[in-house]
Image (cartoon, helix red, strand yellow):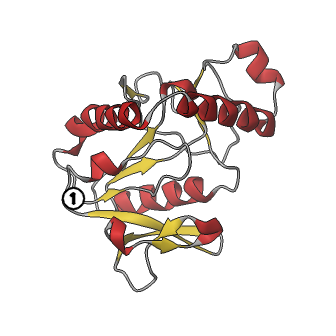
Amino acid sequence: MLLNSKKAIRLTKSDLRREFRAARRAFVAGVDSTRRTGLEQALADQVAPMLQAVVIVGSYAAVADEIDPAWIEKRVGSHAFPRVSGSDISYHAARRHDLRPGFQGIPEPPATTPLVEPDLLLVPLIAVTLSGVRLGQGRGYYDRALAGLHAAAVQRDRPLLAIGVAWECQIAACLPADPWDMPLDMIATPERLVDCRKPR
């Protein structure tokens, strides 16, 4: 969607969420199921080179018009899904068939599944810039999770790689960022894989 940078600066985060949700909805509405599957398989192709030495991938259960990372999960052994508890997200080793409706009806693993610390995280988003500034739902769950997982990664001396996954229409020219917003390391769409760390 690449909003004009001057326009993006004038808009609030709420305005931007509304605009990018509408763009995502319109894009997905114009794609039939066969084409959508092809695009999500192409997303997995883009991410594949980053999966080589990964131990655990943190994924998510896509809802509505979010791009689905299920084809990425098929390429890795161990993976985990987020579970909301209070104001935080924890990651639990699980398969898709283990997931049950949780916070706001979003599928999540049961509390009894093993708690893990992924070393690669697939992050859903509403919009993102090529420098890794992410616009999420606005509750800060992923920012807090990323901060905690980065700290844990330093302790175990194994870096965390955070990859935002999106349709191409979710790429923005610029987005406002607050001090607590955690930048992404990479962005993957069906068309490309962008290393956001290079401009930083």
x and y percentages locating residue 55 in the rendered image: 21, 58
* Quadrant hosting residue 37: top left
Q: How many marks?
A: 1
Q: Nearer the viewer, residue 116 or 157?
A: 116
User: Would you say 63 lies left or right of 19 here?
Assistant: left
Quadrant (top left/top right/bottom left/bottom right) for the N terminus: top right
x and y percentages locating residue 41 in the rendered image: 29, 37
Look at 70% across and 41% down and name the residue there: 178
Look at 37% across and 22% down and name the residue there: 191
* Quadrant hosting residue 197: top left
Look at 48% across and 39% down and name the residue there: 184
Q: Nearer the viewer, residue 30 or 191?
A: 30
Amino acid type at image mark 1:
Val
Look at 83% across and 22% down and name the residue there: 10
53, above or below 173, in the image: below
x and y percentages locating residue 165 in the rendered image: 44, 39
Residue that badge 1 annotates: 55
79, above or below 83, in the image: above
x and y percentages locating residue 49 in the rendered image: 20, 35
Residue 116, can we see it?
no
Residue 196, can we see it?
yes
User: Would you say 114 lies left or right of 138 here?
Assistant: left
* Quadrant hosting residue 185: top left
User: Would you say 36 lies left or right of 129 here?
Assistant: left
Q: Residues within 10 Å of mark 1 (few under 14, many from 20)?
A: some
What is the secondary structure assignment of the residue under circle 1? loop
Q: Nearer the viewer, residue 169 or 32?
A: 32
